């Protein structure tokens, strides 16, 4: 457990490390987050239950495969040293600000430098065919 400060009411609260690693723990509880402003799970509108946007699903997948050794794709990403920037890991909003919206549901997130990390300046939206050509 770690201590965090609620972004809405400045209250100190206990937070599991696993939740912090997933970018959670910005608010002290559901009632505070729901009644307050800046609730990350509501304000960007990309993570509503069963209606997650292409961008949110992509971001969650990147976080999982770069930070969770139990992820099915860990060995090709986190296991070979590919990381996600701290800013992106902790904030979907920052990820979205840096890469923008996907042009379509068919677009995929691509690392320009395939041995580089998931970070601003190294990621872009491309078609599957373009992604397949960037395997170097």
Image: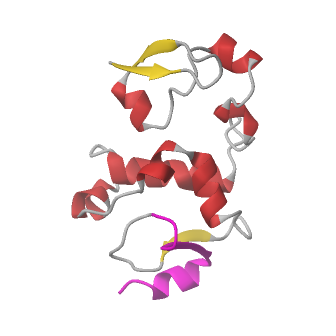
Percent coordinates x, y for residue 107 in the rendering? 64, 71
- Describe residue 21's horizontal placement relative to residue 100 as left or right: left
Percent coordinates x, y for residue 79 in the rendering? 23, 58
Nearest the viewer among 15 and 45 is 15
Q: Residue at x 50, y 21 (%)?
A: 5
Q: Quadrant of residue 21?
A: top left
Verify whether residue 8 appears in magenta.
no
Q: Quadrant of residue 125?
A: bottom right
Verify whether residue 129 appears in magenta.
yes
Nearest the viewer among 105 and 84 is 84
Residue range (magenta): 119-136
Q: Residue at x 39, y 83 (%)?
A: 135
Percent coordinates x, y for residue 36 in the rendering? 74, 20
- Describe residue 97's horizontal placement relative to residue 23 as left or right: right
Q: Relative to 28, does residue 114 appear above or below in the rendering?
A: below
Q: Residue at x 68, y 11 (%)?
A: 31
Percent coordinates x, y for residue 92 in the rendering? 58, 47
Nearest the viewer among 70 and 37 is 37
- Whether residue 15 appears in this view of the structure is yes
């Amino acid at each position: 457990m770690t201590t965090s400060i609620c972004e809405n009411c400045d209250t100190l609260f206990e937070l599991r490390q696993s939740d912090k690693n997933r970018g959670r723990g910005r608010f002290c509880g559901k009632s505070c987050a729901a009644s307050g402003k800046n609730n990350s799970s509501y304000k960007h509108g990309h993570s509503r239950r069963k209606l997650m946007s292409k961008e949110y699903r992509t971001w969650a997948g990147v976080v999982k495969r770069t930070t969770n050794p139990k992820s099915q794709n860990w060995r090709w990403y986190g296991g070979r040293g590919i990381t996600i920037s701290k800013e992106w890991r902790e904030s979907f909003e920052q990820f979205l600000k840096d890469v923008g919206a996907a042009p379509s549901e068919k677009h995929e997130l691509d690392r320009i430098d395939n041995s580089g990390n998931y970070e601003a300046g190294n990621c872009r939206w491309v078609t599957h065919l373009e992604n397949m050509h960037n395997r170097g």
